[in-house]
Amino acid sequence: MKKVLLTAIGGSSAGTKPISTSILSAVLKAKGHQVVFFDSTFLDLGFPLDGEIADRVLQFKKVDWGRHNLRRDKTVDAKAAFLAVVEREKPDVIAASAMSDMYRHTVEFLKLAKERHPVPAIVGGVHATILPEEVIAEGCVDALCVGEGEEALLEFLDSLEGSTIRRTDIKNLWIKKDGQVFKNPVRPLTSLERLPFLDYSIYDERQFLRAYDGRIIKSGDLQDKRGCPKKCPYCANAILNTSIYPGTRINYYSPERFVEEAKHLKLTYHLEFFKNFSEDILIRPIDDFARMAELYAKEVAVPFTVDTYPLSITEEKAKLLKKMKCASVSVALECGNYHYRKNVLRRDYDNDTFVKRLRILQDAGLRTSTLNMIGLPYESRKMIFETLEVNRRASPSVTCVTAFFPFRGSPLGDLAVRERFVDPELVKVRRSDASQSILSMPQISSDEIKGIRRVCYFYLNYPRFLFPVIRLAEPETPLGNIVFELLILTQRLKVRLSPILRALGVR
């Protein structure tokens, strides 16, 4: 038996229990290993939580984060807290899961751990999968995992003799030994049916509290499949589908297995809500989806949110979502300019089709949310307003607008670097932030993108004749700040002024 310290360092989403650490903890415990977990979400790492950013730009209905203690504790030194766990628990292995935003912080913490408690450290997650050469070059990293890690991590633990790694031929792993790096091939995808249920017991109670529609609810995180057939160039799937798992099918849980796990999580953790992290819930074949909907409605019946692709939406599947008690469906438009969306983003549907497919969900009585990016490479101010206009037509319940971030290793991120829209060194040290861009392009500056994002709520919801006034609020100047605060005031008084605002055409 080994003691494994799992980490999630550098995260910014309060109320989220990562699928990666949840399943790894379950797999390790099923084989008799001991699991310790360190999560930095509620410790201060110098950047805000996602909810705080969303509040700042009026992304969602406001909630009282402080009332539920869903804020970072600035009185505790995060690195000292991590070292205290390492020294107290004395793990045999540190296993870090890191997305690109989390990677820099993860390495900083692993370096400290290596100095105090030099045991093998293995890194997995999207960043290690997409940029393995960079990760394995770190002195504090002894191995990394490309792709899925359940079986690979178990074999890695079995190969340890004290702190010595005896095997270097473990599939999915790159392993350092005696000055060499052993790069092993990727094994076939894991059979999801054989996996244990997700383990939420490792998490702080606050990670069960999710903001939804102005409320704080007790929520779980799960998925009904792994994989996405799309190759959107801003996403890791563009690499996974071409270089890591080329030609691989989507890996589904059976309807029975998915519902069994959802029911178990609901009852074990007393949940009232789920976030389904599958890339597209509606891509499942209709007969299979109908079976899943029937079982879920009967055995679980817990409201949930989920994502889907516009062309996956049909009237039949929308009705099945409603039957399952789906609370909200997020659909990605990304960019309102059709030619850019088709030729650069590889998402081939016109704006009329997008609006019609969203209307199918709305007609079925489902809350809808759209996902959009602004400040994309080559994008102009005019193109950004095309995106806002499509959203005005579609009238979703929530419009999520985020500034594009050039993640390293993604085709679109690498293009931004090649075109010198961003300094590659800046990409390494900055995090994605929905409210601001790090790209500066000839046709639009990062400040202008930030300004549009700051006031896009008003561009989306106020009448067009007010656009010149709204534009005054874009820059963070004395005048801009005054106009912005006045706009905020009108939004806060919207209920009291609703008769007048309706007469002006304000939604």
Image (cartoon, rainbow, N blue to C red):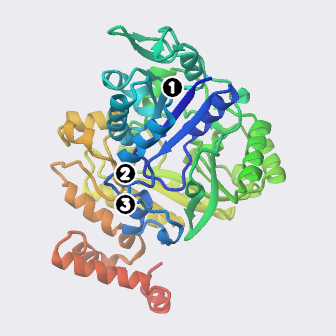
Q: Name the residue under label 1.
A: 92
Q: Position of residue 446 (x, y in %)?
A: 21, 54
As helix, strand or loop, the secondary structure at mark 3 comes to loop
Q: Give the number of the disc on residue 75.
A: 3
Q: Can residue 237 be seen in this view?
A: no
Q: Residues within 10 Å of mark 1 (few under 14, many from 20)?
A: many
Of callouts 3 and 1, which one flags the residue occurring earlier in the amino acid sequence? 3
**Residue at position x 47%, y 23% in the image:** 145
As helix, strand or loop, the secondary structure at mark 2 comes to loop
Q: Name the residue under label 2.
A: 337
Relative side of 218 to 430, left or right: right
Instruction: Choose mark 1 or mark 2, whichever is in front.
Output: 1
Instruction: Choose mark 2 or mark 3, whichever is in front.
Output: 3
Q: Where is residue 275 in the image (x, y as percent from the top left)?
A: 61, 52
The front one of 204 and 185 is 204
Of callouts 1 and 2, which one flags the residue occurring earlier in the amino acid sequence? 1
Q: Are marks 2 and 3 in contact (CB under 8 Å)?
A: no
Q: Where is residue 229 in the image (x, y as percent from the top left)?
A: 54, 32
- Asked where in the image residue 29 lies, by quadrant, the reply is top right
Q: How far apart are marks 3 and 1 (CA)?
A: 30 Å
**Residue at position x 18%, y 48% in the image:** 441
